[in-house]
Image: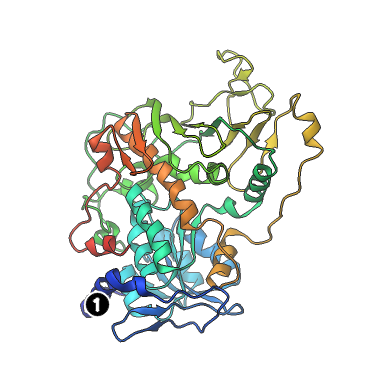
Amino acid sequence: MKKTNNKKNNNRRDFIRKTGVSIGSLMVLPSHVLFAKKEVRNASGQVIQKAVVLPNDKVNLACCGVGNRGASVVRDLYATGAANVVALCDVNMGGKKTLKTMDIHKKAKQYQDFRTLFDEMGDEIDAVSVATPDFSHFPITILAMSLGKHVYVEKPLTRTFQESEMLIRAAKKFNVATQMGNQGHCQDNYYQFKTWVEKGIINEVKEITTHMNGRRRWHGWDTQMRKFPVGGKIPKTLDWDIWHMAYPHHDFHKDFIDGQWRCWYAFGNGALGDWGAHIMDGFHQFLELGLPQKIEPKKLTGHNDLFYPQSSTLAFHFPKRGDMPKVKVTWCDGEENLPEVPENYGDIEIDTGAKTKKGMVKPKKLRPGKVIYGKDLTFRGGSHSRTLSILPGENAKDIQNNLPEYHKSETNHFMNFLNASRGLEKTLSPFEVSAPLSQVFCLGTIAQQLNQTIVFDRKTKTITNNAMANQLLKSYPPRNGWEEFYKLA
């Protein structure tokens, strides 16, 4: 594995400082104008013409994060037949979970430090995939964008609200193709929801219930924990310093790696960030929800200052948007924290002993999904690409047989990104769409962490009722040597 070259690293930092103030002068070219792969720079090293991949060419792809979920992302991008995997990067390159990816892509150059990858291969890659822990998405993504590389980033987009805010600005500034990895946002769920809103089938929505009640990694942990765990031997293949990226140093423990990072407020976005992107994506975009005004923790079982609750019920309050009414979106997670659903919901086992509101029942189990309450119709939906169904009722009879057709996409989320990198189409989950969705999750996790209602000013993008909560929009200041990444947008 390649280690950081100090001379090249200094050159990169010089370039970052220069582009940070002058990259706005980039020549912006229409997407239908196609150039050879290599970008053009001036004498100072600024990109004055970003690379555009020819439509019939494969995209030269560098993959950051190639174990766990990252291995699946590499596999799915490669399976399109539209990508050459030319570089693999992982802080635990050579660890057990990266070996299969390394074996498949033997010719790809290997790195542990993404900065070295860009130093050495910046002119050889067109696009970058980022499938690392939530807290480490931002530095890789912003550097790739500043160098004119198209970026595919797993959900949630960032660990903090402010990092997503900076990526919204960066998407406008650097004019590259961007895609967040909420895979169902490119398939039937997307096109059905879009069409049903446009045709008035879904209208005057005032309430939505969302739920994900599967077991999570931190369920059953000691909720009296007051300090991060420490101990254990750092794997020989793991660069523990680079693992931290811009975040403060922590002593090693096995419950920080191999997906366990998702359990902690410091590193991940919990069940909400993990599954919310697959459940809330359609209605968030097409009901134009934007950012909430208030987030209320209605129930937090086993609240702890370090890791996520055993179960959570959060109420997100969104204001009127034009002619659309206020909306309350309720999120429920935790194995026993199932929401009430309409009595005509369908194929579920009902808890007959539970007390419920009139017309509602309490299920014993539910697949991840949502219930959307419109003016005349109620809709049942799942996650990812699963489509909505209209719950039976008096108002549904006339509509069921006259539903409008919607577009059936033959392009999946990964090919959509690679085609956008080649100038053939636009991504369906670009940062201007997916970053505000991720910011909703970031606000929700702050309410979970503090166990307090959060009041949010949508205009100033500040939390107005709690100074500590407002500070958490940014979280930790970057550690020494990582400040440069937060000056690029």
Residue at image coords 71%, 54%: 407
- Given residues 339 and 488, the one toward you in this image is 488
Please say whether residue 394 is visible from this viewpoint: yes
Residue 263 falls in image quadrant: top left
Please say whether residue 65 is visible from this viewpoint: no
Residue at image coords 46%, 57%: 431
Image quarter of the C terminus: bottom left
- Left/right of residue 353 with respect to residue 146 in the rendered view: right
Residue 106 lies, in percent from the top left, at 47, 75
Compared to 77, does 34 lie above or below? below
Count numbered badges in the picture: 1
In this figure, which residue is indicated by the disc labeled 1?
5
Compared to 344, does 408 lie above or below? below
Residue 396 lies, in percent from the top left, at 75, 30
Which residue extends farthest front?
322
Q: How is the image coloured?
A: rainbow
Residue 241 lies, in percent from the top left, at 24, 60
Residue at image coords 45%, 32%: 317
Image quarter of the N terminus: bottom left
Compared to 166, does 368 lie above or below? above
